[in-house]
Image (cartoon, rainbow, N blue to C red):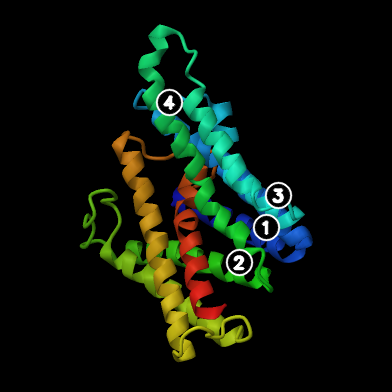
């Protein structure tokens, strides 16, 4: 019951806040959204570095925080401020070069840790920042506010319905995937159905934004495809983080989000689903 109350509190607070940021702060190609992505990428990178620490691979948290924003920060400079597009590969090359060469002058006893450091450093550059940066890419589109809200609703509906269906109908069908034994088939099916439903609703109520352009398919079919692929990606994002946490014997990536755990526990589905939504939307509707 406590977990349910905490989840409801966070839902009632964060969903209106996120929608407000997306809808009412569109300036500079939704700079407020992009800054939020940068902040989440940094916090997620810190938590990711914390998971590495549990298996003896250490990267300073401050360094992880900076490396974690390399991709979304560069994308924000390009999208919101019109900086030359070459800045993105430039920042990425500088960040990865720093990771590779920064241990050249380490003391001899520290050299044995270099490989682990490089592995952790490259990982926090890529996850979750690289994946979340596709949300920043979405802000380039016309009607970006509506598109981003539909994307978030598909993911949120998937997560919420999976939890509800799992509680109601998942008692005898749990443990299918060892990485997350508490998840049930009923939960996965319910989450996917909810994502498809949001895709269909978007097609019905936002026809000017969700009109098939590249392939000749019935409009409801494109809504089903959008919801299906993004819903699958959202579920896989959640499961993938479960694999990472289970591999280091950790239940939550952190403890700063009420009822959820850490930042990564809250954005894992969004991170993996963002590039999938971008690709499917672009292919079907742009």
The residue drawn where x is 69% and y is 57% is 79
Q: Are marks 4 and 2 in contact (CB under 8 Å)?
A: no
Question: How far is mark 3 from mark 1, CA to CA?
Answer: 24 Å
Whole-percent x and y of residue 221? Answer: 43, 86
Mark 3 closeness class: few <14, some 14–19, many ≥20 residues within 10 Å: some
Question: How far is mark 3 from mark 2, CA to CA?
Answer: 19 Å
Q: From the image, state whether disc 1 or disc 4 is nearer to you.
A: 4
- In primary-sequence order, the first of circles 2 and 1 is 1
Mark 1 closeness class: few <14, some 14–19, many ≥20 residues within 10 Å: few
Question: How far is mark 4 from mark 2, CA to CA?
Answer: 35 Å
- In primary-sequence order, the first of circles 4 and 2 is 4
- In primary-sequence order, the first of circles 3 and 1 is 1
- Front residue of 94 and 285: 94
- In primary-sequence order, the first of circles 4 and 3 is 3
Residue 227 vertical placement versus 219 (above, below):
above
Residue occupied by mark 2 = 148
Q: Which mark is residue 77?
A: 3
Residue occupied by mark 4 = 117
Residue occupied by mark 1 = 17
Mark 4 closeness class: few <14, some 14–19, many ≥20 residues within 10 Å: many
- In primary-sequence order, the first of circles 3 and 2 is 3
Looking at the rendered structure, the secondary structure element under dot 1 is: helix
Q: From the image, state whether disc 4 or disc 2 is nearer to you.
A: 4
């Amino acid at each position: 019951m406590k977990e349910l109350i905490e989840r409801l509190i966070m839902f009632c607070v964060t969903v209106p806040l996120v929608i407000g940021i997306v809808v009412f702060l569109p300036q500079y190609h939704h700079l407020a959204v992009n800054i939020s992505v940068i902040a989440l990428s940094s916090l997620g990178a810190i938590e990711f570095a914390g998971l590495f620490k549990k298996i003896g691979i250490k990267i300073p948290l401050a360094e992880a925080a900076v490396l974690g924003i390399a991709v979304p920060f560069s994308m924000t400079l390009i999208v919101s401020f019109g900086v030359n597009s070459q800045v993105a590969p430039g920042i990425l090359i500088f960040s990865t070069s720093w990771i590779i060469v920064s241990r050249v002058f380490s003391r001899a006893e520290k050299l044995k840790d270099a490989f682990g450091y490089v592995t952790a450093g490259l990982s926090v550059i890529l996850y979750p920042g690289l994946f979340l940066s596709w949300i920043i890419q979405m802000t380039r589109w016309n009607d970006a506010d509506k598109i981003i809200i539909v994307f978030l609703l598909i993911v949120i509906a998937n997560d919420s319905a999976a939890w509800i269906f799992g509680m109601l109908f998942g008692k005898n069908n749990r443990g299918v995937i060892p990485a997350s034994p508490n998840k049930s088939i009923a939960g996965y099916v319910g989450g996917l159905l909810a994502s498809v439903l949001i895709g269909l609703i978007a097609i019905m109520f936002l026809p000017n934004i969700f009109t098939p352009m590249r392939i000749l398919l019935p409009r409801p079919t494109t809504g089903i495809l959008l919801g299906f692929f993004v819903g699958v990606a959202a579920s896989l994002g959640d499961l993938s983080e479960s694999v990472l946490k289970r591999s280091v014997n950790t239940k939550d990536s952190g403890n700063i989000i009420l009822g959820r755990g850490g930042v990564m526990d809250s954005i894992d589905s969004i991170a993996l689903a963002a590039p999938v939504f971008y690709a499917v939307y672009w292919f079907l509707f742009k």
